[in-house]
Image (cartoon, rainbow, N blue to C red):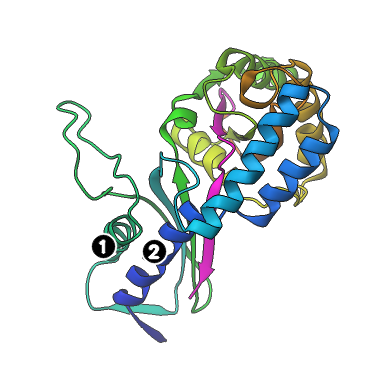
Amino acid sequence: MRVVHVDTITEAIKKLAIEAAYYLNPEMIKAFENARDTEVSPIGKAVLEELIENTRLAKEEKIPYCQDTGFAVIFMELGQEVHLEGGLLEDAVNEGVRQGYSEGLLRKSICDPFTRKNTGDNTPAVLHLRLVEGDKIKILFDAKGGGCENMSKVVMLKPSDGLEGIKRLVVQHCYEAAANPCPPVVVGVGIGGTMEMAAILAKKALLRPLEQENEDPELAELEKKLLMEINKIGYGPQGLGGRWYALGVKILKHPCHIASLPVAINLDCHAHRHKEIII
């Protein structure tokens, strides 16, 4: 049994919150550069060049890459051989978010859904917890912006809609989303499970490294086909026209009920801010 004080988790969450806001993952910068070099639209090229410059300024000046520093969404894998001491896990997570958004001078965006009164510290976070083997704690931190989160959808397709129905749904959704999610986007798709499970799968799918191919050959092929079809729409960077509306499509699936075919789509903006740490 390994004993871990919850303050360790608080400190890790604080660090991840700040780093996610300031430092875009290298894979995204590389994706911007590749897109710029292959973009057919002069305006699209200019937009991508601005995004690349923005990543440099954010890193050097230690300021947020985007003014919307997001909703803190945490996927945590907690080893069953870990014993937490010093307080409640959820409290430790929220304290990390509170400290990170305060010390990092990050915008606090969380409010009551009715009164719209701001909570003042970007809490509470959304925590998805999973017990796993071992004595380690893996934390995936996702700073999810409001604009792209608004472009989310869960649809209960009929089983007879099948794979073709899923393809049509995803492409049509991107067509309808247009420039609202701040493209170039990354498209997360969750297939199967139940209504809420599909939504969680779609969001978790976004956290797979952009260049990492799906382990499921069928899903890997589907991701490539969807990416091609989505970019054929021609919206391009920031919806101003061009080749690169989406930089990647990421899919997770789960067995579902014989009477159901849940599909969720979760778009992520060009900031695509997520960090991870293993404790």
Residue type at numbered disc 1? Glu
Q: Is residue 260 magenta?
A: yes
User: What kind of element bears circle 1?
Assistant: helix
Marked residue nearer the N-terminal end (2 or 1)? 2
Asked if residue 212 is positioned above or below residue 195 in the image, the reply reads below
Tell me where residue 67 appears, x and y as whole percent: 41, 40
Q: Are marks 2 and 1 in contact (CB under 8 Å)?
A: yes
Q: Residue at (30%, 75%) from the top-left corner?
A: 7
Could you say which quadrant of the image residue 102 lies in?
A: bottom left
Asked if residue 41 is positioned above or below residue 14 in the image, the reply reads above
Tell me the residue that label 1 is attached to: 95
State the mark number for residue 13. 2
Judged left or right of residue 44, residue 126 is: left
- Secondary structure predominantly adopted by residues drawn in magenta: strand
Q: Which residues are magenta?
A: 258-279
Q: Quadrant of the N terminus?
A: bottom left
Q: Residue at (59%, 37%) from the top-left corner?
A: 270
Residue type at numbered disc 2? Ile
- On the question of residue 180 being in view, the answer is yes
